[in-house]
Image (spheres, grey):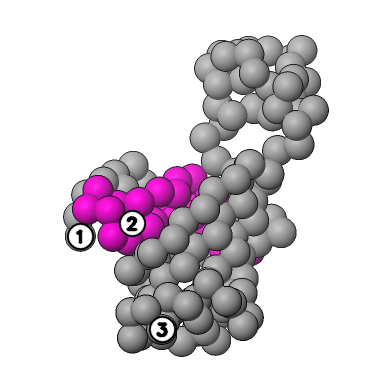
Amino acid sequence: MDAAQIGAALDDVFDQALVFHGFTDYLRDYDVIVYASADPSTGIRPEHLRYRFRYCVRAEVTTSVAPETWKRSLDDAFVDGWEDRDDLDGYVWGVRWQVLYPGAKVVADSEAAAAWSARLGMPMHEVLIEANGHTISLVFADLLVDRVEPGHSPFTVT
């Protein structure tokens, strides 16, 4: 995919649920799995989409959660058992998803992508993915998008 196609593919999951991200078990590619849904009145069924960033030479993940919220969210109750609590004031890690907002975009004129393009002799791209839990920066060569079944293991080579 070229940069315009990657940008269009990322636009499709704006404000959806990021349910997993990480390197594949063979460590070359980086997967981002999104639960995409629409207003039920549209009749569009929800689906899990896998965004596989191929030949990923750099993945940087940082928190998007503010330090003061982190401090209030350290208790394990924010991971497990939160469903039965109404007194929690912090980031609930246990929901096991994060909102893709403000979203994902191709970084125009990326110095990192240009440097890796020169090193590898192939076009490289940089994408910035911003969610309410993490900010992810990836440098990679290609993007594949496909549907996966609910419960899909991201550690299965396909």
**Which residues fall within the magenta stretch?**
12-37
The image quadrant that residue 14 belongs to is bottom right
In this rendering, the answer to whether 119 lies above or below 136 is below
Residue on which the image places disc 3: 118
Numbered label attached to residue 148: 2
Task: Give residue 62's position: percent from left, percent from top.
Answer: 60, 45
Q: Residue at x 44, y 49 (%)?
A: 21
The type of residue carrying mark 3 is Ala
Binning the other alpha carbons within 10 Å of mark 2 as few (below 14), some (14 to 19) or many (20 upward) gives some
The image quadrant that residue 78 belongs to is top right
C-alpha gap between disc 2 and disc 1: 10 Å
Q: Is residue 97 left or right of residue 149?
A: right
Task: Give residue 47's position: percent from left, percent from top.
Answer: 44, 57
Task: Give residue 83's position: percent from left, percent from top.
Answer: 61, 19
- Mark sitting earlier along the chain (3/2): 3
Helix, strand or loop for disc 1: loop
